[in-house]
Image: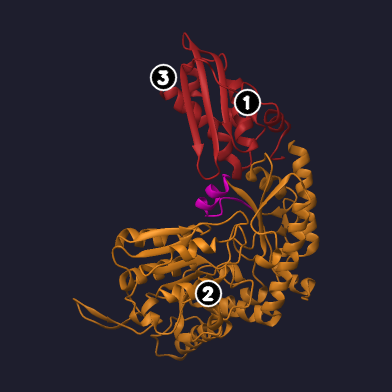
Amino acid sequence: MIDVAKIRADFPILGRLENGKPLIYLDSAATSQKPRQVIEAEARFYAERNANVRRGLYLLAHEATELYEAARKKIAAFLNAYPEEIVFTRGTTEALNLAAWALGETRVSAGDKILVTEMEHHANLLPWQEMARRKNAELLAIPINKEGELDLSAFHKALDRRTRVVALAHASNVLGTINPVQEIAEGAHKVGAVVVLDAAQSVPHMPIDVKELGADILAFSGHKMLGPTGIGVLWAKGDLLGDWPPFLTGGEMIREVWLDRATWADPPARFEAGTPPIAQAVGLAAAVEYLETIGMAAVQAHGQELTALALEGLLARPFVEIYGPRDPQKRGPLVAFNLRGLHPHDVATLLDQEGICIRAGHHCAQPLHRKLGIPASCRASFYLYNTSDEVEALLAALGRVWESMR
Amino acid sequence: MSPYEEVILDHWKNPRNKGRLADPDLVGMEVNPLCGDAVRLELKVKEGRVTDVRFAGEGCAISQAAASLLTELVLGRTLAELREMKDEELLSALGGVIPTRLRCALLPMQALRKALKTSA
């Protein structure tokens, strides 16, 4: 059990009004709110320790570098990984682009196969599309079944010796589905394929141990887990990064440079060209510390509790259609739904009049919505600062929206 | 301002001139692939004046109410007048539209402009 009232007091924004009503923020899957511990850590860095990292010879620069590298260690420990396996990026999107590009350069040739799934966010689809095009490889999407879960028999059937990469969401940002990474990794590794996980919707919400997970590469964003925007993480197992050529080139990622050539720094620096998001790394470390203090198991349990309440309430309303598994244990803390005959944009605008912020649209998953046969959907997503009263408020407001638009 | 003024709810629940014309002179269609909103406008024109109009479409209440209301605004007008018609006329007839939903409300105007282009 977590003390939500105490947690809420740490989030200044939760005190504001939305259209004159108390803010009910149910869009943490898009971006989470930030506790003052994170805001202050970032502000304190700028006020007291700001300098560029890795090159200054003065004390201040040394202190900034120490903080930046301490953030890397903090995040590594959070995932049970090694610091050398952690690359800071701008976010999940950049991390996945880096991985797709580097795997394309090192492991994929014409005629090879790359597997994705029908439930991918565009960020974990387009980099593979582009790589497959560049390498003349085949891109195949594993279908989902009626429950919104992966069709594992189709996955095993698609898997063969030509398969070089299996890229999938750990938790779907629309269906909520948590995919069986261990089973998928076991199959993929048998044929020598690398497993890449879009963990943007899982790392913020559940305990993650990369040594148990089975994936080889993991990408996530700081801003969905109480941290700042502009920073994300690419984790790659062991010496995978060592084989990769740089994705971006420039300052800080080199060993030696001549006018006509250069040699590269070791990972992770090789993949951090230019001045990195230093204050953001410090902020992300503060976010991880905040989550660790609460405990990821407790964060997950709270999310499941709210999701169960939302699912139960939505399923009890005949005018609501929901997408994804009915079992809250099989989900991340979000629910996508529609009110029959109403466009999700109308639902979102009307809820906003009551101070309730949800997402409406295709959630950067157009192929998935096409598969579901809908142009768009509403999505409510929860985090550690949300209360069961807020879920009840959403359910009650949906009833009023439905009545007003009939 | 409520984002769903009475006029929007009225046109959403009781759309005017919804359907298809047997033999339209001008047709314009506009789609927003981001949200799936679609509006098709069909006009019958005699001596440069709109004598009949229908809309078909699907999507949010604002886009569909705006399309319904637009059919009332264009009926009886000349094509020359319609070419001069401003977005603001439709928006104010709708009772005002919140900034986040302007794109929805103006989708039918884009359909109308496409229809007018086919008459040039």
Quadrant the C terminus of chain B occupies? top left
> Can you tell which quarter of the image residue B58 is in?
top right
* Residue A48 in sight in this render: no
Q: Chain of mark 3?
A: B
Q: x and y percent of residue A204 in the render?
A: 61, 72
What residue is disc 2 on? A280
Q: x and y percent of residue B54 in the render?
A: 57, 21
The amino acid pointed to by label 1 is Leu
**Residues drawn in magenta:** A359-375
The amino acid pointed to by label 2 is Gln
Distance Cα–Cα, label 2 vs label 3: 56 Å
Q: Is residue A348 above or below residue B31?
A: below
> Can you tell which quarter of the image residue A163 is in?
bottom left
User: Would you say A101 lies left or right of A21 here?
Assistant: left
| Element under disc 1 | helix
Number of other residues with Cα within 10 Å of mark 3, as a class: few under 14, some 14 to 19, many 20 or more = few
What residue is disc 3 on? B119
Q: Colour of chain A?
A: orange
| Element under disc 3 | loop
Whether the magenta-drawn stretch holds residue A68 is answered as no
Distance Cα–Cα, label 3 vs label 1: 22 Å
The amino acid pointed to by label 3 is Ser
Distance Cα–Cα, label 2 vs label 1: 49 Å
